[in-house]
Amino acid sequence: MKVGLFGGSFDPIHIGHLIIANFALNEFALDKVIFIPASTSPFKNDYLFTPIDRLEMVKIAIRDNDKFEVSDFEVKNGGISYTIRTVEYFKKLYRIFLIVGQDSAESLHCWKESFEILRNVEVLVYRRIIDGIVKDFKVPEVLVEYANKFHIINSPYIDVSSTLVRELLNSGKSVRYLVPDGVLEYIKRIGINVVF
């Protein structure tokens, strides 16, 4: 079974995540995409939402797509979420396609046991808009022997980020249409002021 693993903070999940996952699913003929919210990312420690809230928001966001699933593997394990542990767990079950943003792919050599990760997965890269420009993806020199493991997802360029959503929420502005309505309702229920 070909499965896309889409890990991330999802702080919160937004429409860009869903669009990218759907394009990866179609373009690479994946059987499903599993969203895996991190407990704590090794590269981020400032969260607006708790791991449990981020997990619940992903569940809400994907509930109407039977090709999307969510795993609590990293949230349940707690602590810092290293991709190698997740890959080691899921490789026993599936043929893995790791869905990552361009910036993450270009710094993948800095990840814990990056070479071991690349021995076990194909990497599906969604390109990002940086300073208003779509940058070409380049495999880092240190990973050039694994260049055939990287594949570009030909999805639309979605210039939406969780950072933008958090900034809008914090400034009392509407994030409608940037996150699914059910996620907006959840954010409101947990006590964050939401402008519709």
Image: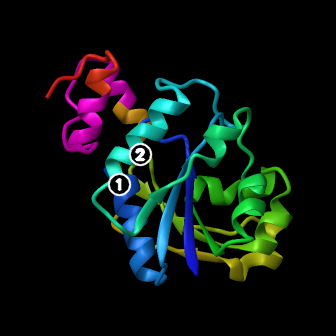
Q: Which mark is residue 58?
A: 2
Residue segment shown in magenta: 166-186
Residue at position x 49%, y 82% in the image: 28
Q: Is residue 36 left or right of residue 180?
A: right
Give the quarter of the image for residue 155. Answer: bottom left
Is residue 136 something one can see in this rendering? no
| Figure colour scheme | rainbow
- Within-10-Å neighbours for mark 2: few <14, some 14–19, many 20+: many
Which quadrant holds the C terminus?
top left
| Identity, as a three-letter code, of the amino acid under mark 1 | Ile
Q: Position of residue 147 (x, y in %)?
A: 72, 78
Whether residue 51 is visible, yes or no, is: yes
Q: Quadrant of the N terminus?
A: bottom right
- SS at circle 1: helix
Residue positioned most to the left: 196
Picture quadrant where residue 88 is located: bottom right
Query: Where residue 159 sits in the image (x, y, percent)?
Result: 35, 50
Question: How many numbered discs, if any?
Answer: 2
Give the residue drawn at x 17%, y 23%. 195
| Image position, residue 161 (x, y; %) | 41, 43
- Using the image as rendered, state which of residue 131 and residue 97 is in the foreground: 97
Q: Are marks 1 and 2 in contact (CB under 8 Å)?
A: yes
Q: Residues within 10 Å of mark 1 (few under 14, many from 20)?
A: some
In this image, 136 relative to 121: left or right?
Answer: left
* Amino acid type shown at disc 2: Val
**83 sits left or right of 73 in the view:** right
Q: Is residue 36 above or below residue 152?
A: above
Q: Report the disc number at residue 62.
A: 1
Asked if residue 78 lies in the magenta stretch, the reply is no
